[in-house]
Amino acid sequence: GDSVTQMEGPVTLSEEAFLTINCTYTATGYPSLFWYVQYPGEGLQLLLKATKADDKGSNKGFEATYRKETTSFHLEKGSVQVSDSAVYFCALNTNAGKSTFGDGTTLTVKP
Amino acid sequence: DAGVIQSPRHEVTEMGQEVTLRCKPISGHDYLFWYRQTMMRGLELLIYFNNNVPIDDSGMPEDRFSAKMPNASFSTLKIQPSEPRDSAVYFCASRSALSSYNEQFFGPGTRLTVL
């Protein structure tokens, strides 16, 4: 079945540091890939998405590139801010009804 | 646009009581999902509906949990009787089958505490 494996957290960075959160997946067919973000006390919200190989999703300075050859969708940001502190979830959907989510990675950014 | 609406936002109850959580999906969305989030087990899919019909309830923990979707704009998740281990944040999400990306839209969650 489909699965998503995320880098284990928690991740703690200083402000303006470079961020990478690794995500690899296993899926039948050609999935759409997503990163969701969950701020404290809130629900998950879509951060960025990509639907086919080599697509790059981007939003709020975050980027992720759909790599079919390595089945990966790593999240990156060049310079994190304190306000980026949140839990980040990698997810996929293969046109099935439900999406498959990773376990989430907690990011804490210190000033 | 109103997003996914959940009520109540917080619920505190005593063990053995019935709890009903409510969800209003985004208008026009034809999929609805119920999730549970805890520190120990992370985000778990409990059940999802398509066009008001339950499609997969394999994540429902036990018979104490039930979910209904009587119409396209309303769903409930009921726990009867509730137990302390049911304490968690419960999220409802919806999406449209017409979306080219199949992204889900989450509600703000209901934080349930069972004493």
Image (tube, coloured by chain):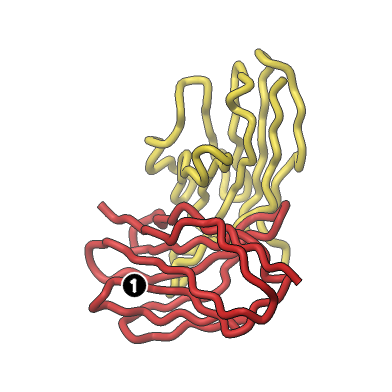
Chain colours: A red, B yellow
Task: Answer with the quarter of the image where residue B75 lies.
Answer: top right
In the figure, B25 relative to B38: above or below? below
Count of marks placed on residues: 1
The N terminus of chain B - image quarter: bottom right
Q: What's the residue at 53%, 33% (across, down)?
A: B67
Q: What's the residue at 51%, 48% (across, down)?
A: B33
Q: Nearer the viewer, residue B92 or A80?
A: A80
Please name the amino acid that badge 1 sits on. Answer: Ser
In the figure, A6 relative to B6: above or below? below
**Residue A39 spot, x, y in % from top left:** 68, 60
Q: What's the residue at 74%, 22% (across, down)?
A: B13
Q: Nearer the viewer, residue B104 or A77?
A: A77
Residue denoted by label 1: A72
**Residue B25 spot, x, y in % from top left:** 62, 53
**Residue A25 spot, x, y in % from top left:** 32, 63
Whether residue B27 is visible, yes or no, is: no
| A96 lies left or right of B31 | left
Q: Residues within 10 Å of mark 1 (few under 14, many from 20)?
A: many
Q: What's the residue at 62%, 69% (across, down)?
A: A13
Q: Nearer the viewer, residue B39 or A29?
A: B39
| B46 lies left or right of A66 | right
Label 1 is found on which chain of the structure? A
| B58 lies left or right of A61 | left
Task: Answer with the quarter of the image where residue B115 lies.
Answer: top right
**Residue A8 spot, x, y in % from top left:** 46, 56
Task: Answer with the quarter of the image where residue A24 lies.
Answer: bottom left
In the figure, A25 relative to B73: above or below? below
Whether residue B78 is visible, yes or no, is: yes
